Amino acid sequence: MPSASRLAQCPRSKANTAQCTCTYTSCPRHGLCCECLHHHRVRGELPGCYFSETDEKTYNRSVDFFVQRFNK
């Protein structure tokens, strides 16, 4: 879970956390969307919120997996 000071710095952290569909709630970026997007982008991935609930639980964040699931 993100530190309280980092969450306090984000004016939307409460709304982000309430709407976040990522099941990895102990992630240090949970509720900090800009950090989450950057984290996954530099790895060539997408964040969990781009996936269905079932697909998100696989923790496969690859763009290829997203395209494969999206085109079903």
Image (cartoon, rainbow, N blue to C red):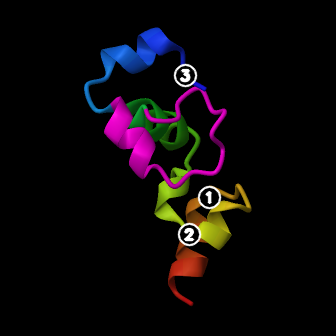
Q: Residue at x 32, y 15 (%)?
A: 9
Query: Outermost residue toward the left?
Result: 11
Instruction: Identify which residue is drawn at 44% across, 30% down.
Output: 35
Q: Amino acid at mark 3?
A: Pro
Q: Residue at x 28, y 32 (%)?
A: 12
Residue position for label 3 = 2
Label 1 secondary element: loop
Identified at 64% across, 51% down, the residue is 23
- Asked if the residue under mark 3 is in contact with the one under mark 2, i.e. CB atoms within 8 Å, the reply is no
Residue type at tag 2:
Phe
- The boundaries of the magenta stretch are 13-31
Residue type at mark 1: give it.
Ser
- Closer to us: 30 or 47: 30
Rendered location of residue 3, percent (x, y)? 54, 15
Q: Secondary structure at mark 3?
A: loop
The disc at residue 28 is: none
Q: Does the magenta stretch mainly form a helix, a strand or a loop?
A: loop
Query: On the rendered image, what quadrant is the C terminus found in?
Result: bottom right
Is residue 39 shown above or below 50?
A: above
Mark 2 or mark 3: name the one nearer the start of the chain: 3
Q: Is residue 24 magenta?
A: yes
Disc on the earlier residue, 1 or 3: 3
Question: Outermost residue, right direction?
Answer: 58
- Contact (CB < 8 A) between labels 1 and 3? no
The residues bearing labels 2 and 3 have C-alpha atoms spaced at a distance of 26 Å
Res 66 label: 2
Quarter of the image that includes the N terminus: top right
Which labelled disc corresponds to residue 62? 1
